[in-house]
Amino acid sequence: MAEEIHLSAQTRTEFGKGAARRIRRADMIPAVVYGHGESPRHVSLPGHATMLAVKRENAVLTLDVEGTEVLALVKDVQREHRRREIEHLDLVLVRRGEKVEVEVAVHLEGEAAPETVVTVDHQTLLLEVDALRIPENVVVSVEGAEAGTQVLASGVTLPAGATLVTDPEALVVNVSAARTAEELDAELAEAEAEAGIERDESDEEAEAEAAPIATSDDES
């Protein structure tokens, strides 16, 4: 379940790219806190502690904003493209006992039957859960699952108190028969034919044609 992480936040009054760069140079991260009909609060958060906190999806932060304590759910993390450093956070105010809608990752467990392929069609499920009891993931077991097995969203076991928001008929996991080498080769040949590509002779055939004809020692 979601772990409450306590961070000290400083109100910021400077905005724009230049101000944001100065904040980050001071090992702080600019953020905005909004929700519940309140005016957005612009704050700066401690860089290293915040970076560790947001490694977990749907992290809930307890912010001490200059003596006022608020709970906030991490809604969006904006990162620099190349170095992946955090540039800005969007946080949504929540209250104890309040339910929120969040995307929760689907985690597979177990091994399906031999010669099968397991496909995850939905990597996450949208759930309505208590803001302070957000699961890290939902588990789907494929142990021993045969080809043809399908797990719909309605068939996924949810944590106590969680409600499924995703369409119950949505396909989450599909187990199909693995294609044989012959099927894959036929599919490739068909694709090449449609593209007008002619296959070259195999290396073995080319070598066989190029090899000299053997003669016995008695022949002259």
Image (cartoon, grey):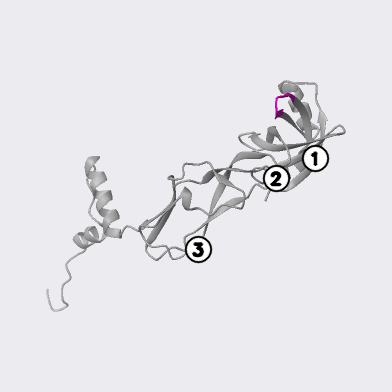
207 shown above or below 154: below
Which residue sits at x=16%, y=67%? Answer: 213
Marking on residue 132? 2
Which secondary structure class fits the magenta region best?
A: strand
**Percent x, y for residue 218?**
13, 79
Corner quadrant of residue 6: top right
**Magenta-colored span:** 34-40
Whichever of callouts 2 and 3 sits on the residue coming sooner in the sequence is 3
188 shown above or below 25: below
Q: Is residue 187 magenta?
A: no
Whichever of callouts 1 and 3 sits on the residue coming sooner in the sequence is 1
Asked whether the residues under the numbered discs 2 and 3 touch, taking CB atoms below 8 Å apart as contact, a structural biologist would say no
Q: Which residue is mark 3?
A: 110
Disc 2 versus disc 1: nearer the observer: 2
Asked whether the residues under the numbered discs 2 and 1 touch, taking CB atoms below 8 Å apart as contact, a structural biologist would say no
112 horizontally vs 130: left or right: left
